[in-house]
Image (spheres, helix red, strand yellow):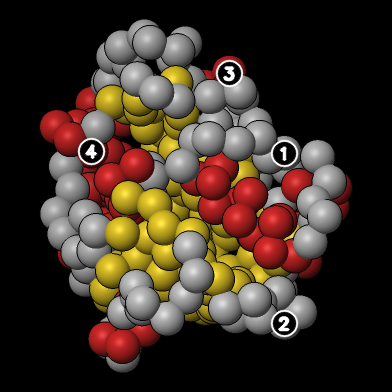
Amino acid sequence: MACSSLRACCLAAFLALLGTTVLSVSGFGAAVLAQSPNQQTAAAPIVRLPDSSKMAAPGATLALDASQRAMVDKVSAYLSGIQTMTGDFVQIGPDGKRTEGEFFIQKPGKVRFNYSPPSPIDIIADGSTVAVRDRTLATQDLYPLSQTPLRFLLADKLNLLRDTNLVGVYADDVFTTVVIEEKQALVGTSRLMLMFGAKDNQLRQWTVTDPQGYDTTVAVYNLNTHKKPDPSLFKIDYTRYDR
């Protein structure tokens, strides 16, 4: 799927996180995957595509063994222990094209993605609402935070076994991966794949698979969980921008 403008591409990418549009990961992801971990640089984090063979079938219940439960508990403790996070991101969008930028998280419920030029897009969540803002056109589109799977990342405390429907838990030498499935009456079933470094347990990327089976991937790096973001980053101006 081609986008007619940078704003359309970034808006489409965010809508995929809501499970309401179609995106695919192709060229850039394949190019990065072709490199070995030793070849990765700060500007090109490792990106791995979803492996459906390691997940339960849609609607199925995943039976966890002791080692999987231990992995899930470790991930839950890591996510619950983080209150702030800043870093850089690479977003894999339509046709394998990519956008980059920086992001800021303040729990509960607040996040901001600032896209690097030439993209004019900012994505802001203030705890209840998400705004996709175009700085050039001075417009913004508003969505409820409760409708995006990324709310799991922004929850103050998270117990994956209790609070989500896990359909995949596995690990290798590079990543520990958990996959959450979510059903919404209006849009269908989506999946959120969270991937963490196998050695340091840090968040590395997430992939959202929309109800049509297409993926949007965001890889993060240069993470800092000690720097507190400026609270003004998460303020949405509900009066200045056209809707």
Q: Which mark is residue 53?
A: 3
Q: Amino acid at mark 4?
A: Leu
Kindly identify the residue that appears in the image at 59 percent across and 73 percent down.
134
Judge from the rendering whether residue 127 lies leftward or rightward of residue 95; answer left or right: left
Q: In the structure shown, which secondary structural element does the residue marked by tag 2 occupy?
A: loop
Q: CA distance from mark 2 to mark 1?
A: 22 Å
Q: Amino acid at mark 3?
A: Ser
User: Nearest the camera: 62 or 69?
Assistant: 62
Q: Nearer the viewer, mark 2 or mark 1?
A: 2
Q: Nearer the viewer, mark 2 or mark 3?
A: 2
Kindly identify the residue that appears in the image at 50 percent across and 70 percent down.
242
**Label 1: how many residues lie within 10 Å, few (<14), some (14-19) or many (20+)?**
many
Q: Earlier in the sequence, mark 2 or mark 3?
A: 3
User: Nearest the camera: 187 or 62?
Assistant: 187
Q: Is residue 71 above or below residue 186?
A: below
Q: CA distance from mark 4 to mark 3?
A: 21 Å
Q: Amino acid at mark 2?
A: Pro
**Label 4: how many residues lie within 10 Å, few (<14), some (14-19) or many (20+)?**
many
Judge from the rendering whether residue 88 lies leftward or rightward of residue 237; answer left or right: right
**Label 2: how many residues lie within 10 Å, few (<14), some (14-19) or many (20+)?**
few
Residue on which disc 2 sits: 117
Q: Position of residue 185 (x, y in %)?
A: 35, 20
Residue on which disc 1 sits: 24
Residue 134 makes an appearance in the image = yes
Q: Which mark is residue 160?
A: 4
Q: Are marks 4 and 3 in contact (CB under 8 Å)?
A: no
Of the 4 image quadrants, the one containing the N terminus is top right
**Label 3: how many residues lie within 10 Å, few (<14), some (14-19) or many (20+)?**
few
Q: Earlier in the sequence, mark 1 or mark 4?
A: 1
Q: In the structure shown, which secondary structural element does the residue marked by tag 3 occupy?
A: helix
